[in-house]
Image (cartoon, rainbow, N blue to C red):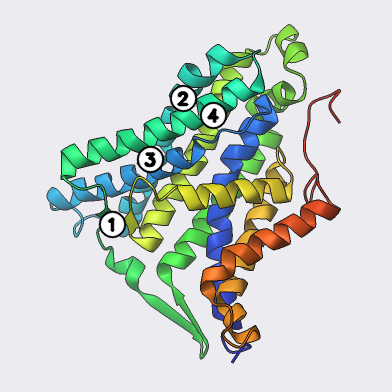
């Protein structure tokens, strides 16, 4: 029984892991540049999910959902979610964080928590006025509901393949952007030493705003993929994934982009294995409802023996 369900468990773990990795990148990029945690990032993730469902509703109302090619529809939905989420993250940085630069980090942390509650309630208010409900189901795309039977014990939904493929392309593109382009070099320079970067002519505030945009876009992408895969979204959908993605960022090494990817994958696989195997291994004493407890216990053990994360925390000069 345990071996029979293993391929399906691995698939579910990969899907969860890639989603956590995409969200975790928003946390880790902001921490790498400003060295504080943007706790409003989970609401940026939810915003992307709501933008995606609204675009699909708009296409559905216009009678285009069954006419346009599914690839074009998915590209449009993903692009809209990434753009709006990225711009929202930039606006958040300008309004809630930039005025507090140079102040105590606790003040910025409180501002982030306040921004999180504001965005959550703003989404709920808007959807309540616009749709008379803030629990929305993604319209069905027939191509995403298809399944591929690759083996007798492995059924792969097309939407799971879409999540994995899109995440891989996005994570690879981001890694190339940060490490192989001039703008990425500027981001790494500001993360390493903002004062020296400013003296070298790098516009630090604009680079910080761009960092928020990129991190927000990754969160928006994760929100759209979450909605397409799990269908139901609401203003509170970001709390649990956001918390787990933050955990993944810490697990891999906060401020470390490959670490965020690795942490997301580890946490997703741990959660999937715990949900599927806890009941089998404990003879029913513990079920899938304890998967989060198991995953966080493993995290605690790893951080006890390696407190800087699996790949090490990235810090500025003079703080190592």
Label 1 belongs to which residue? 138
Q: Nearer the viewer, mark 2 or mark 4?
A: 2
Contact between marks 2 and 4 (CB within 8 A): the answer is: yes
Residue 103 spot, x, y in % from top left: 64, 14
In terms of secondary structure, where does tag 4 sit? helix
Classify residue 101 by image quadrant.
top right
Q: Quadrant of the C terminus?
A: top right
Q: Nearer the viewer, residue 182 or 118?
A: 118
Contact between marks 3 and 4 (CB within 8 A): the answer is: no
- Upstream in the sequence, badge 3 or badge 2? 3
Label 3 belongs to which residue? 47
- Upstream in the sequence, badge 4 or badge 1? 1
Residue 98 spot, x, y in % from top left: 55, 16
Question: Tag 2: Cα neighbours inside 10 Å, few (<14), some, or many (≥20)?
Answer: many
In this rendering, position of residue 26 left or right of residue 190:
left
Residue 29 spot, x, y in % from top left: 63, 35
Q: Which mark is residue 212?
A: 4
Residue 298 can be seen, yes or no: yes
- Upstream in the sequence, badge 3 or badge 1? 3
Image vertical order of residue 198 relative to residue 116, above or below: above
Label 2 belongs to which residue? 92
Instruction: Identify the residue at image location x=66%, y=42%.
Output: 175
């Amino acid at each position: 029984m345990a071996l029979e369900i293993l391929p399906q468990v691995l698939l579910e773990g990969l899907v969860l892991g890639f989603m956590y990795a995409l969200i975790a990148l928003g946390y880790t990029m902001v921490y790498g540049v400003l060295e504080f945690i943007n706790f409003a990032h989970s609401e940026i993730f939810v915003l992307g999910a709501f933008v995606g469902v609204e675009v699909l509703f708009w296409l559905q109302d216009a009678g285009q959902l069954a006419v346009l090619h599914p690839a074009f529809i998915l590209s449009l939905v993903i692009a809209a979610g990434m753009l709006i989420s990225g711009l929202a993250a930039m606006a958040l940085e300008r309004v809630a964080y930039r005025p507090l630069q140079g102040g105590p980090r606790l003040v910025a942390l409180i501002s982030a928590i306040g921004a999180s509650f504001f965005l959550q309630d703003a989404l709920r208010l808007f959807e309540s006025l616009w749709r008379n409900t803030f629990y929305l189901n993604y319209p069905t795309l027939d191509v995403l509901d298809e399944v591929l039977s690759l083996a007798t014990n492995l059924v792969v939904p097309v939407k799971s393949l879409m999540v994995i493929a899109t995440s891989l392309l996005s994570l690879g593109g981001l890694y190339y952007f940060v490490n192989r382009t001039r703008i990425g070099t500027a981001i790494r320079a500001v993360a390493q030493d903002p004062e020296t970067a400013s003296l070298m002519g790098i516009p630090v505030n604009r680079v910080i705003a761009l960092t928020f945009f990129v991190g927000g876009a990754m969160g928006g992408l994760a929100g759209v993929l979450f909605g397409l895969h799990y269908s139901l979204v609401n203003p509170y959908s970001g709390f649990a994934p956001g918390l787990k993605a933050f955990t993944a960022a810490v697990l891999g090494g906060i401020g470390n982009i490959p670490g965020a990817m690795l942490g997301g994958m580890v946490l997703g696989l741990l959660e999937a294995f715990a949900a599927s195997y806890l009941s089998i291994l404990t003879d029913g004493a513990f079920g899938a409802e304890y998967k989060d407890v198991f995953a966080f216990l493993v995290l605690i053990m790893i951080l006890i023996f390696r407190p800087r994360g699996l790949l090490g925390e990235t810090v500025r000069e003079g703080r190592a």
